Amino acid sequence: MELRQTLRTLASMAILVVVLVACQQGESVDVGDPGTTQAADGGTVGTSPPDTGGGDETAGGTLIAAQGAEPDRLDPHLTSAYASFQILENVYDTLVQPGDDLTMEPALAESWDISDDQLTWTFHLREGVKFHNGRDLTAEDVVYSFERIMDPETGAANAYRFESVESVDAVDERTVEIRLTRPTPNLLVNIGGFKGMAIVPREIVEDGTIDTHPIGTGPFRFVSSSPDQGILLERNPDYWQEGLPRLEQIRFVQIPDPTVKLTNLRTGEVHWVDSVPPQELEALAGDDSIALERVPGGDYHYFALNHAREPFDDVRVRRAIAMAIDREEIAEAAQFGAATANQTAIPEGNFWHHDYAPFTPGDIDGAQALLDEAGVSDLTISFMVSSEFPETVTQAQVIASQLEPLGITVEIDDVDFSTWLDRQGQGDFDAFMLSWIGNIDPDDFYYAQHHSEGGFNFQGYSNPEVDDLLDQARVETDQEARKALYDQAVEIIVDEASYIYLYNPENIGAWTTALDGYHVRGDNAVRFVEASLGS
Amino acid sequence: MTGFVVRRIGQMALALLGVSVIVFALIHFVPGDPVRTALGTRFDPDVYEALVRRHGLDRPLVIQYFSWLGSALQGDLGVSFRSGQPVTGLVLERLPATLTLAGAALAVALVVGVPLGVVSAVRSGSKLDYIASAVSQVGVSVPDFWAGIMYILLFSLTLGWLPPSGYVSPLVDFTGWLRHLVLPALAVGLVSGSIIFRFVRSAVLEALNQDYVRMARAKGLSRRAVLFDHVLPNAWIPIVTVVGLQLGFLLGGVVVVEIIFAWPGIGRLAYLAVGDRDFTVLQGSVLYIATMFLVINLVVDLLYAWLDPRVRYD
């Protein structure tokens, strides 16, 4: 009897669940109770944010930051994972660093001089900078860090950035001299563009703790890391920037599923999330407790055809494809409008942007004429994409429908990213699609990708004129002259469709309105140095 | 009995060896290369070569396998290529979370599956039986990860009752631990509970139709006495079998749910290791899960002997 009742209750609950779930569809429902259940050091992942300091308005509080990916290791020279750099950005410093407008500004180096022949750069270190273990930073630390990156045995992916560096020497305690084999106008970006070139103390490399207990000079020092409690940082009271940082602690937690990550933000379990899928923009915009920020970024999406395979070796075929696509439509489908179509790599508003758009969007007639001229019909292109970057799959689908009128069949070859990288490296593709992120200097945008000797020219593009322009631009120290060289190179790269550029996505950030002093950056670096938590 | 256990342990060792060969073969036969994956899109070829050499990835695969096996037999599962950390440590610090989740899910499954199964069988053909069977059909059909997302949207976002994801150690905050455990345990446990329900129901139904049940009723025993003294003891064997299998499934099946709920367990570790082609970590996680699975199987076999006097392992 009782059992029957229980079951009846259960059944009606089940029906209720179904109904509620059905009603739930994307509505913004603010639970609104941020709660004060746990102090941050109580060791919880994704609990309610702690009360930010019992009415003390100066205390910055503890920030809980949710990352979508898992940091692999914490050695800044060895990791290539963005998730690791989100943390390390706040722990380490570089000699120089990109400012808010991405021009290079002083960091550990207060100033620098360049010799007349452009081959010797002398950096003067800031006084009184201490590592988190209390030891003073010296010029030897800079020499040690750079030599560690440059040594191939270290296995640092960024060794290539020191290609033009002949030697790094400590002149005295606070002076570092870098000698170059050729003028390198973008040296500052190369050695300080992001925390992969961090200055580390030798002792943590030698005792092997750099991966588990990083020690830097940055605004926050590392406290602990565990799979269930995430990664905890605390304020560095000896930080070299007066009055900073403001936050007492930062706890980075990892929430792989994007829906669940945003749910944590909306229920107030976390204060900040590392990325927002563009399709969620609308839902989040209606939530008063969440601040959204969108800034044009320097990243770009593109695809490339395999120039070593017929018929993509024929520039007319590549141009036909570049002409036939409609970039606006691709950007809209893949980024829900949070992007700007671009036929080149560098977005408008950037000093290095070159206003060049030779193709009329969706020019099927022009494209057909070129294909006819090349004698190509019934073409099938296999597009190598990866679901780990879901926008690439969407883009390939849109491109497939855009190329259909030309009689081109696009096959979507969706592989995991490890496979993708492997096949790209081996040249085993018709076309691959991805994005380049975090570039600052035009040399980062073009040299490795389009120079015939470039390390990432997997598409196999080769044009001596472009090589020549890129080689000249690389050593040209006059900004305007340098830009003119890149502008010329870009026009050829676009005309010959070495890459087929699509768009620049916006960088999107979302956080609780209680977080102040944080902004989305053009290079997507996550800097909490000026952030604080109000109520 | 002792002989049986010793023999079974020997078989377990062979099975684990087989598992390690299969994992090794699978991760090496799919395309993808751990060095390239670790270095990302941009690197210097010299660095690539140096890393390949340092990790011995330029040696023939057979040598690589036996070198791993040699260390593994001495208890050293190697070092993660990706993070540089010892594999045993990585696995052990995540083991409690996975065991907790699998255990809680099993509890949910048993609490839901067994009593409902028995009652449904006893009152077979009743409304209750139909409803329970229909609900269990939904339970086995709905993927646990989808159910997980739905629970999060309902119980966390809409109702605000429970935290959407994460894990708390019970030693730090017992209530917090329970609150975080509920949703993932439901997501995994209700699927298993539905399967257990169906097995229990049919096992009890079958026992109910035996001649000895009619005999017992004819002797004048009450329904309750017949059920508890004659039917259930005979239905236990198939039930224990399916529960054992389900527990094995739970250990493997928590992978996706661990990702959804940001649960810091072995499943998530193994999942990331596949993407990174981090062989030692994948191998280590799989071996731990396989070992647990085999131990559970052994325990189930021993339970047979205890439950059914006719079963003897001599």
Image (tube, rainbow, N blue to C red):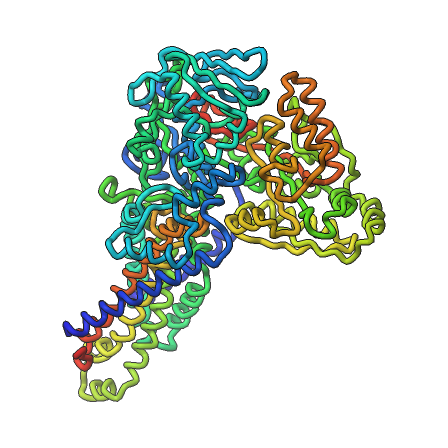
- What residue sits 37% from the left and 68% below the top? B195
Q: Is residue A403 visible?
A: yes
**Tally of marks:** 0
Quick one: B72 or A101, which is closer to the camera? B72
Left or right of A357: which side holds A70? left
**Is B27 situated above or below A509?**
below
Residue B134 position in % (x across, y down): 43, 68
Quarter of the image for the C terminus of chain B: give it.
bottom left
Residue B117 position in % (x across, y down): 32, 70
> Within the image, what quadrant is residue A45 found in?
top left
Left or right of A123: which side holds A321? right
**Is A69 situated above or below A244?**
below
Residue B123 position in % (x across, y down): 33, 75
- What residue sits 22% from the left and 85% below the top? B217
Quarter of the image for the N terminus of chain B: give it.
bottom left
**Is A162 situated above or below A370?**
above
Left or right of A310: which side holds A215? left
**Is B196 situated above or below A92?**
below
Q: Is residue B151 visible?
A: no
Quick one: A444 or B148, which is closer to the camera? A444
Residue B258 position in % (x across, y down): 38, 50
Quick one: B44 or A360, which is closer to the camera? B44
- What residue sits 23% from the left and 87% below the top? B212
